[in-house]
C-alpha cells in the first residue's frame, strides 16, 4: 500500500495550492485510480467465462477447439491422450473449467487453470500451476491452497511419512534447513497396505537416474536421492507397481505402502526394460516366496517347502520317502538348514513324507548353492535358510486346513496395533487309518508327529525393534516291532535391530537349538 499513502500525501499538498474546482477533479481522479489499484486481481479472477451449449457426439479435440474459438482462451493438450474421448453433454451457465470437467467426468483427464487465459488438459499427471507452500527456504506460506494433487508439510522436522497415494507430492526433509549440498538420504519401510507386513526384496528406483536399491528382510530401504523433485518407482513380485512423487529437501524417513495384485496370465511376453535391469552381487543364490511354493501341486493336501526346493537346478533328493537334499553332488549332511537363524538337524516328518516347516507361517526360502557367505560357516555343500513371516499388525486373522493325514491351524493379529504382532501355527497328524491299510504283519505299527511355530515382533520405537521366534516339533514311529524311534527339534531365537542413522543399522541375534532323539524298546524297557 505504498502508492496509495504517497498519493494521499501529494493530494494534501496540492489542495493548498489550487482552486476549488481543481481540488474536486483531483479527488475524483485519485478515487478512480485507487479503485483500479485495489481490485484488478479480483476482476481478473471473476472474468472466467461461463459456458452454455449442447455438445453432442463430438471428439474431444473438436470440443476444445470450439471452446477456444468461443472464449478466446488458450488450450494446451496432447492429441494422443484425448483421441479416443468423445463428448456428449448439455451445459448450462457453468464456468469454463467446470464445463470441461463435466465433459470429461468419466475419463482420467484432468483440468488446470492458469491466469489469465490458459487451460491445461492432462492425463495421469496433474498440472500444478503453483508451487507448494515452503518450496523456497524462508518463504511465507500462502493462504490459498492448491486445488488438488499437492500435500503440504510444515517446515519443522517430520516423523516418518506414510504414503499410500501416487497422485500426491510428498515433502521429505526440512525446507528451512536443507543441510549439505549433496543428495538427501531417504529411508523407510515398504509395507503391505492391508496387513502392514514388510515387503521383502522390493525395488526402489529414482526415475531418470541409475539409483536402485532393494528392501531387506524387514522391508527397510536406504537410498540417496538428489535434492529436488523426483519420482520413486517401487516394484515387487506379487504387488502392484506404484510410484511416489517426492520433493527432497534433505535427509528424511518415507514409508511406502503397496497393494497386493493377483495377475491372470493369458499369454507370456518376454521383454527387457531399463527399469527392471537390477543385478545382484550375490552369486549362486535362489529365493522362493510362499506364493510360489503354494502354486506347486501338493501331496496329501499339504504344501511342502522342501519338495519345491527339489525342483531347483542342481538339487536332487537322496531317495524315496525322504526330504534330504543333495546339492551339486554334495552329501545331505553337508547342507546347513536354518529356520529363523536356528539350526534344524532333521527337517522331515512321517518317514520323510512331510517337511518340518508349516507352509502357513513360512515367508520365503533362500538357497545358497555356491559362494556361501562366511557367516554361514560350517557346511561344504549349501545353505537353506527359511524365514517365517510377521503377523498381521492391523486385525485378527486365521487359517485352518484339513488334509488326508494332517490338520493345521494358524492364528495371527496385533498385540499393539501397527507396532507389534504375533503369529502362531500348529500341525498334527492322524495317520492311524493309513497304517491300518498295510498288510497284517504291520498291524501294530504307529506313527505321528506335531510341530508348533511362534513369531512375535515388536517395534519399541523408530530405531529399535525386537523379534522373538520359537519352534517345537516331535516325531514317534515304529513298524510292527518292539522298537520305537523318537526325535524332535526345540529352537528359540531373539533378534534386536537398532538403526544408528540413515545409512547404518545393527542386527544382533541369539538363540538356543536342541535336537533330541532316542531308540527304545516297548517290550523290555530296561534292556531297551
Image (cartoon, grey):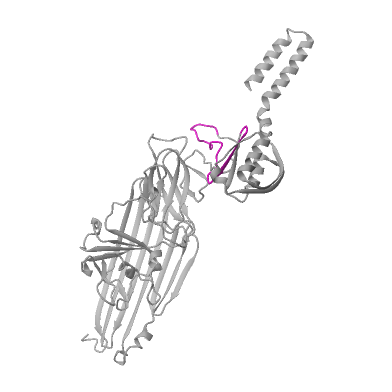
The answer to if 422 sits in the magenta stretch is: no
Nearer the observer, 174 or 88:
88
The answer, for residue 48, to whether it is visible in the render is no
Q: Quadrant of the N terminus?
A: top right
Nearer the observer, 153 or 355:
355
- Relative placement, left or right, of 486 versus 410 is left
**In the image, residue 188 lies at what x, y percent?**
42, 49
Q: Main secondary structure of the magenta part?
A: loop
**In the image, residue 240 lies at what x, y percent?**
46, 55
**In the image, residue 520 lies at what x, y percent?**
24, 83
Q: Residue at x 62, y 33 (%)?
A: 117
The answer, for residue 140, to whether it is visible in the render is yes
- Relative placement, left or right, of 135 versus 64 is left
The magenta stretch spans which residues?
115-140
Q: Residue at x 55, y 40 (%)?
A: 127
- Quadrant of the image occupied by residue 97: top right
**In the image, residue 299 lies at what x, y percent?**
37, 76
In the rendered view, tell whether residue 158 sits above or below residue 456: above
- Relative placement, left or right, of 299 versus 155 is left
- Relative placement, left or right, of 472 versus 102 is left
In the rendered view, tell whether residue 258 sits above or below residue 53: below
Q: How many marks?
A: 0
Q: Quadrant of the C terminus?
A: bottom left
Amino acid at each position: 500500500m505504498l502508492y496509495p499513502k504517497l498519493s494521499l500525501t501529494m493530494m494534501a499538498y496540492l489542495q493548498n495550492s489550487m482552486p476549488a474546482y481543481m481540488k474536486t477533479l483531483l479527488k475524483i481522479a485519485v478515487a478512480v485510480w485507487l479503485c483500479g489499484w485495489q481490485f484488478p486481481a479480483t476482476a481478473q479472477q471473476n472474468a472466467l467465462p461461463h459456458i452454455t451449449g449442447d455438445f453432442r457426439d463430438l471428439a474431444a479435440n473438436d470440443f476444445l477447439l470450439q471452446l477456444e474459438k468461443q472464449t478466446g482462451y488458450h488450450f494446451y493438450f496432447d492429441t494422443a491422450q484425448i483421441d479416443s474421448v468423445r463428448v456428449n453433454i448439455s451445459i448450462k451457465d457453468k464456468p469454463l473449467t467446470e464445463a470441461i470437467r463435466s465433459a470429461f467426468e468419466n475419463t482420467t483427464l484432468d483440468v488446470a487453470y492458469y491466469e489469465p487465459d490458459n487451460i491445461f488438459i492432462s492425463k495421469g499427471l496433474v498440472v500444478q500451476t503453483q508451487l507448494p507452500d515452503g518450496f523456497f527456504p524462508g518463504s511465507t506460506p500462502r493462504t490459498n491452497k492448491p486445488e488438488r494433487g499437492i500435500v503440504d508439510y510444515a517446515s519443522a522436522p517430520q516423523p516418518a511419512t506414510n504414503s499410500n497415494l501416487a497422485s500426491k507430492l510428498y515433502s521429505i526433509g526440512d525446507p528451512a534447513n536443507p543441510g549439505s549440498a549433496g543428495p538427501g538420504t531417504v529411508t523407510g519401510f515398504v509395507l503391505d497396505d492391508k496387513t502392514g507386513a514388510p515387503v521383502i526384496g522390493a525395488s526402489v528406483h529414482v526415475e531418470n537416474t541409475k539409483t536402485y536399491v532393494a528392501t531387506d528382510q524387514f522391508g527397510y530401504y536406504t537410498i540417496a536421492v538428489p535434492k529436488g523433485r523426483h519420482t520413486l518407482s517401487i516394484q515387487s513380485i506379487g504387488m502392484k507397481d506404484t510410484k511416489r512423487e517426492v520433493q527432497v529437501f534433505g535427509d528424511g524417513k518415507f514409508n511406502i505402502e503397496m497393494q497386493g495384485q493377483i495377475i491372470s496370465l493369458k499369454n507370456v511376453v518376454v521383454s527387457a526394460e531399463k527399469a527392471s535391469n537390477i543385478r545382484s552381487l550375490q552369486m549362486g543364490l535362489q529365493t522362493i516366496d510362499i506364493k510360489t511354493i503354494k502354486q506347486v501341486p501338493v501331496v496329501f493336501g499339504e504344501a511342502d517347502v522342501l519338495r519345491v526346493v527339489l525342483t531347483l537346478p542342481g538339487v536332487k533328493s537322496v531317495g524315496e520317502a525322504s526330504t534330504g537334499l543333495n546339492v551339486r553332488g554334495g552329501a545331505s549332511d553337508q547342507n546347513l538348514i536354518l529356520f529363523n537363524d536356528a539350526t534344524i538337524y532333521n527337517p522331515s516328518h512321517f518317514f520323510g513324507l512331510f517337511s518340518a516347516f508349516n507352509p502357513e507361517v513360512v515367508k520365503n526360502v533362500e538357497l545358497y548353492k555356491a559362494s556361501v557367505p562366511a557367516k554361514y560357516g560350517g557346511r561344504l555343500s549349501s545353505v537353506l535358510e527359511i524365514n517365517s513371516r510377521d503377523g498381521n499388525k492391523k486385525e485378527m486373522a486365521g487359517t485352518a486346513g484339513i488334509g488326508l493325514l494332517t490338520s493345521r491351524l494358524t492364528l495371527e493379529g496385533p498385540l499393539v496395533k501397527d507396532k507389534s504382532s504375533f503369529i502362531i501355527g500348529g500341525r498334527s497328524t492322524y495317520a492311524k487309518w493309513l497304517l491300518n491299510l498295510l498288510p497284517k504283519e504291520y498291524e501294530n505299527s504307529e506313527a505321528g508327529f506335531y510341530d508348533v511355530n511362534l513369531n512375535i515382533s515388536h517395534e519399541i520405537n523408530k530405531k529399535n525393534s525386537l523379534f522373538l521366534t520359537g519352534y517345537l516339533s516331535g516325531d514317534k514311529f515304529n513298524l510292527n516291532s518292539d522298537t520305537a524311534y523318537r526325535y524332535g527339534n526345540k529352537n528359540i531365537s531373539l533378534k534386536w535391530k537398532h538403526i544408528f542413522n540413515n545409512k547404518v543399522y545393527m542386527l544382533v541375534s541369539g538363540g538356543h537349538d536342541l535336537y533330541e532323539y532316542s531308540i527304545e524298546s516297548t517290550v523290555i524297557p530296561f534292556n531297551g
